[in-house]
Image (cartoon, rainbow, N blue to C red):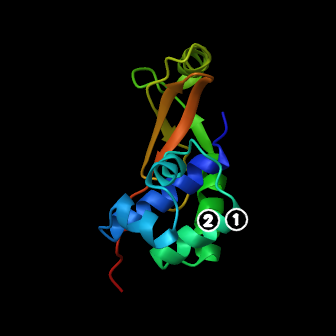
């Protein structure tokens, strides 16, 4: 199962906006893009052009390079996600059951593979859509580490 680039970009844009406690209306005005279209971009339903991404990033005071770097890190981390069921997460039976449920669109959750370092993707969930399940991310603020 792979994550769509437009979904990862949308999640990161929403994360940046909500961390600044700004509304969709505020960003849509500043970026000169319709509120509905911006909402669809954040939800991963529309593929934003490079010009539109640059405008949204400028409105968010977020460097485009930083957005793309974070999205690349998210996509790379998702490549190492191991699918498991909530009840039977371990062993060959649990894995076979997880694969069957994923194929049927019934998957309820996942877990990070041991050895993955970082906390950018604190929550992973699968949401059924028209074309089958799609992996979505919820990104939380990074944890502060005492020096």
- The structure residue drawn at horizontal position 44% and vertical position 25%, both measured from the top left corner, is 108
Give residue 117's position: percent from left, percent from top: 54, 60
Give residue 51's position: percent from left, percent from top: 68, 67
Q: In the picture shown, does residue 81 fall above or below 86?
A: below
In depth, the one of 30 and 83 nearer the eye is: 30
Whether residue 17 sits left or right of residue 9 in the image: it is: left
- The structure residue drawn at horizontal position 32% and vertical position 81%, both measured from the top left corner, is 146
- The structure residue drawn at horizontal position 61% and vertical position 60%, both measured from the top left corner, is 71
* Residue placed furthest toward the bottom: 147
Whether residue 121 sits left or right of residue 116 in the image: it is: left
Q: Quadrant of residue 113?
A: top right
Whether residue 60 sits left or right of residue 73 in the image: it is: left
* Figure label count: 2
Q: Quadrant of the C terminus?
A: bottom left
Classify mark 2: helix, strand or loop.
helix
The residue pinned by badge 2 equals 53
Cα distance between the residues tagged 2 and 1: 5 Å
The residue pinned by badge 1 equals 50
Give residue 73's position: percent from left, percent from top: 62, 61
The crowd level at tag 2 (other Cα within 10 Å; few <14, some 14-19, many 20+) is: some
Classify mark 1: helix, strand or loop.
helix
Q: Quadrant of the N terminus?
A: top right
Give residue 135's position: percent from left, percent from top: 55, 37
In depth, the one of 9 and 125 nearer the eye is: 9
Instruction: Determine whether label 2 and label 1 are within 8 Å by CB.
Output: yes
In depth, the one of 37 and 3 nearer the eye is: 37
């Amino acid at each position: 199962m792979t994550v769509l680039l437009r979904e990862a970009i949308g999640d990161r844009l929403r994360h940046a906006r909500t961390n600044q406690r700004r509304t969709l209306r505020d960003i849509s005005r500043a970026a000169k893009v319709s509120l509905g279209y911006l909402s669809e971009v954040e939800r991963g339903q529309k593929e934003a052009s490079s010009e539109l991404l640059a405008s949204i990033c400028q409105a968010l005071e977020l460097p485009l390079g930083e957005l793309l770097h974070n999205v690349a890190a998210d996509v790379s981390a998702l490549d190492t996600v191991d699918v498991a069921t909530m009840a039977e997460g371990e062993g060959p039976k649990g894995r076979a059951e997880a694969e069957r449920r994923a194929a049927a669109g019934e998957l309820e959750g996942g877990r990070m593979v041991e050895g993955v370092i970082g906390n950018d993707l604190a929550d992973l969930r699968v949401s059924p859509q028209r074309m089958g399940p799609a992996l979505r991310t919820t990104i939380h603020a990074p944890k502060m580490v005492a020096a």
